Image (cartoon, helix red, strand yellow):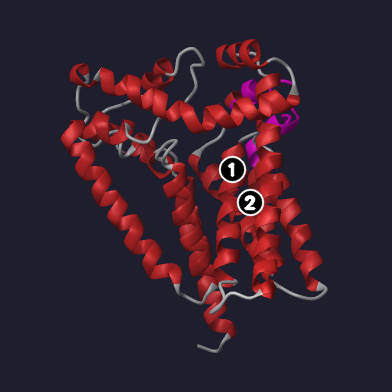
Amino acid sequence: MYLLVLLAVAVLATVIRFRGSVPALFAENPDVARQAQREQSNILVGLLSEAWTLGVSISLLRALTLGGRGRALYYAFTFIFILGAALGGSRNSVLVGVVPGLIASLSVRRPQRRTSRSFAKSSVVTLVGIAVIGTIVFLGGQRTLAGTGAFETEFRARYGGSALTASAGSLDLSLSSSGETFGRLWAQRESLAWAHGAYSLTFLGSLVQPVFGDVDLYGITSQLSWPYYMNTATFVAIPLLDYGPVGAAIFLVILGLCVGLAERRLEFTLGPAQHLARGLIVYFAAFGIYELYPFIYPTWLSLIPGLWVLHRLGRGSKGE
């Protein structure tokens, strides 16, 4: 029932978001369509659209941990929610739902001792994860090949039009471009003016601009990702631009401690909401190597009440 409610919310958000236009996933030029749809959207629609993300995680967790005939139903839910999450043409919108669900599934299946049966179950989860993520990487390469911007043009010039090389090139850039951008940003650190917290509050948008001023993180980092001009914020850009080298080091140490403590606190919990929350923390921490996503986009804020509702439903079903 909770998944059906999430589906209804997600469909409503999608109808409002696209309003008669072709979703970026099916557009001739996905990047142009994404930009146009981003300009006509708003934060409320973005928050409601995270119902797709939460639906992916919950249905995938249930499909991978439930036995019997009911498993097929949850795999069907997983497919529907993944398709909905992919409509915007963003790989991260799908990965942020899939990866936490996989992590939570492995956590739930963690045995007291290793047996051939437990190894087989973990292998199924791992293979499903590889298949889904591999598909997402492939579609990401195809989206890049269909684009017409500076990044897409340079990408085709370097990797050609082959689907295989495009997928490999897309994965390579996702793993390496953040480090390259950081190196170039670090080389210019002496000329940077500190913003004293404005970049750290980017996810709040216009709410903090009157106090901290208007800053453009991607306007700086995209120029540093030459020759691709990618919107690669790099994991140290926000604290470095806000607090300088020493402040950035302290910022990252505190952030790492908070992530470690939260992950450890949730590691041995029993509820599905807690396992999914742990999976989200692990995902955002790993994705932080690319960019500090939660500090840039506010959409994760809707995942917190969504998981809280799931937690309360779980407690209610046990009569607590």
Determine crowd level at label 2: few under 14, some 14-19, many 20+ residues with C-alpha closer than 10 A: many
Number of the front mark, 2 or 1: 1
Q: Are marks 2 and 1 in contact (CB under 8 Å)?
A: yes
Q: Is residue 19 magenta?
A: yes
Q: Identity of the amino acid at label 1?
A: Ser
**Marks 2 and 1, Cα distance to the nearest angstrom?**
9 Å
> Quarter-wise, where is residue 167 in the image?
top right
* First to last magenta residue range: 15-34
Determine crowd level at label 1: few under 14, some 14-19, many 20+ residues with C-alpha closer than 10 A: some
Helix, strand or loop at disc 2? Answer: helix
- Look at the image and tell me whether residue 152 can be seen: yes
Q: Identity of the amino acid at label 2?
A: Trp
**Circle 1 is placed at which residue position?**
93
In which quadrant of the rendered image does the N terminus lie?
bottom right
Percent x, y of residue 299: 49, 46
Helix, strand or loop at disc 1? Answer: helix
Residue at 65% x, 68% y is 119
Q: Which mark is residue 52?
A: 2
Q: Which mark is residue 59?
A: none
Of residues 214 and 111, which is closer to you in this image? 111
> Relative to 44, does residue 270 appear above or below in the rendering?
below
Percent x, y of residue 112: 53, 79
> Quarter-wise, where is residue 24 in the image?
top right
In the image: residue 226, left or right of residue 110: left
- Look at the image and tell me whether residue 23 can be seen: no
> Relative to 306, does residue 98 appear above or below in the rendering?
above
Percent x, y of residue 101: 60, 59
- Compare marks 2 and 1 and give the one earlier in the sequence: 2
